[in-house]
Image: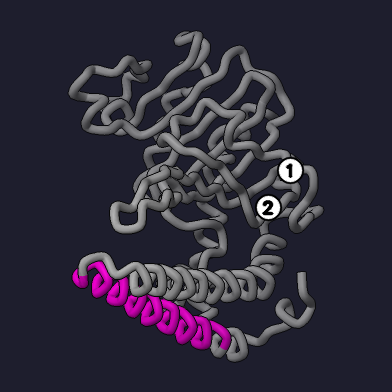
Amino acid sequence: MEEKNKNLTDEQLSQQLRKSKGGKWGGMLLSLLGGVIVFAGIVQGGNLVLIVAGVVILALGQTAKGKSREQAGRQTFDALAPDIVSTVFDNIQMDPTPHMLDAKDTNIPLPGHTYCSGSGYIRGTYQGLTTELCTVRLTEVNELQREETGQWEKNEREVYTGQWMLCELNREFPTWLTIWPRERMDKLFGSKTIRTGNEAFDKRFNVSSDDEAAALHILTPDCAEKILALADSSIGKFAVNLNRDGRLYLAVHSGRGFFDVGKGKEPPDALRRRFTHELKWCTDMIDVFRPAAE
């Protein structure tokens, strides 16, 4: 990470966040202008020059907006993340390679997507257990042909953004299990799920495994109650996947990543509090399963 970003004061970081908001608005105005030009070209009977010019301006606006947000995110990450993570983890590695965490290597249900990418990887030891966190983004890409120009274009849509964490519990389990939120369609079609006997838990979560008895031995009544308590303070819909080899995956579909500045409206002290809360929430979920590894 860049040393100059790491040493930013809160006032300097606030100034950078304000600058990024200005760049974001500039990009939005450029995008709006491009959209208007495209519309004008269509209204004029498919004026190809106006349509192409509008598309180019629209693309430039989207690029400017994305770069502004990306720069603000990187500066905030470099300035705040190391100190926050160091209060929870030991032996910290920023952006370690190769990565341990692989979103495709889990039983966690995910929406249909074309690409899966991770960013902001951080590795450390939590209570002696190797742990890695990152931001996971899933995108769906479709190709469409514009009637006005006949050209094929790729339409990329983000379908999932969330905070993920992997913790190696350093012991084997008799089976795997996955916990994920119950949706209305699950109830409508009576999707198969393991019942824990805790009515409140069973109304909110699905549980799957290849061995129901072994899964319930892991997911004890006390464990279910702790998960319910965390659900009440959750930063988003979440899923948990425990593997036989002790790899514990936590995925929070929050719509943002770890150390994400969001809309950039929060001052550094508020960001610091939110980031600390989000990280602690994740380690509290690890604690639900960690005693079994001792």
Q: Quadrant of the N terminus?
A: bottom right
Residue 214 visible, this angle = yes
In what quadrant of the picture does the C terminus appear? top right
Closer to the camera in the image, 83 or 222: 83
Which residue matches tag 2?
121
Secondary structure at numbered mark 1? loop
Describe the element under mark 2 as helix, strand or loop. Answer: strand
Residue for point 71% across, 24% down? 171
Q: CA distance from mark 2 to mark 1?
A: 8 Å
Position of 99 relative to 19 (above/below): above
Seen from the viewer's position, the closer of residues 195 and 176 is 176
Q: Quadrant of residue 32?
A: bottom left
Does residue 30 belong to the magenta stretch? yes
- At a point 28% along the width and 76% down the height, the residue shown is 36
Dot 2 amino acid type: Tyr
Q: Label 1, on which residue?
A: 99
- Where is residue 197, by image quadrant? top left
How dense is the environment of label 1, judged by Cα within 10 Å: few (below 14), some, or many (20 and up)? some
Q: Are marks 2 and 1 in contact (CB under 8 Å)?
A: yes
Which secondary structure type mostly characterizes the magenta part of the structure?
Answer: helix
Q: Is residue 290 left or right of residue 217?
A: right
Which of 85 and 76 lies nearest the eye of the viewer? 76
Q: Position of residue 166 (x, y in %)?
A: 63, 39
User: Which amino acid type is shown beneath numbered disc 1?
Assistant: His
Q: Is 260 colored magenta in this rendering?
A: no
Q: Position of residue 209 (x, y in %)?
A: 48, 15
Residue 273 in view (yes/no):
no
Residue 270 in percent (x, y) is at 48, 75
| Quadrant in which residue 12 is drawn | bottom right
Question: Is tag 2's residue or tag 1's residue first in the polypeptide sequence?
Answer: 1
Q: Which residues are magenta?
A: 16-44
